Image (cartoon, rainbow, N blue to C red):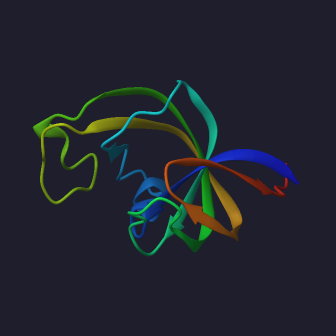
Amino acid sequence: MKKFKALSIVAPACDHILNGKKTLEIRSWRPEQLPLKDLIIVQNTRYLLEEGDEQQGEAVAIVNIEAIHAWKPEEVELACANAWEAGYWAWEISQVRPILPRQVVVAKRKIYDISIALDE
């Protein structure tokens, strides 16, 4: 088992990240530090809105987040979003590596720690 930082994302966004359609993750907050290397993306099925919210999810990919910028109206498609809204941050997703098979893990709010076994 190895410890990783993780970020939960509501389905089907992780599948869009894996197929290269989604290259930006939009959030209302920024992480404390960059870059985020080897960040585990956890797919879950509902938004985790309250402090302490958790759900069962699946670890689907390892990614890097090397830069974050203010989200721009012309980036709606890159984020696979329905509409643009001011005041959000665009997290630039790079070096997407699928986790196969997907592993059941906890989905939590913000960035959190998980331990998973990966074939390397």
Left-right relation of 38 to 71: right
Please state the total of marks drawn on the protein image: 0
Q: Residue furthest right?
A: 1
Q: Position of residue 70 (x, y in %)?
A: 24, 29
Picture quarter with the N terminus: bottom right
Residue 95 sits in quarter: top right
The residue sitting at 12% across, 46% down in the picture is 85
Residue 117 sits in quarter: bottom right
Classify 101 as above or below 6.
Answer: below
Q: Position of residue 11 (x, y in %)?
A: 42, 70
Q: Nearer the viewer, residue 108 or 12?
A: 108
Residue 27 sits in quarter: top left
Classify 58 as above or below 35.
Answer: below
Q: Position of residue 111 (x, y in %)?
A: 55, 46
The residue sitting at 22% across, 35% down in the picture is 71
The residue sitting at 45% across, 57% down in the picture is 19
The residue sitting at 62% across, 49% down in the picture is 112
Q: Nearer the viewer, residue 28 or 91?
A: 28
Q: Nearer the viewer, residue 43 or 107?
A: 107
Left-right relation of 55 to 1: left
Q: Residue furthest front?
A: 51
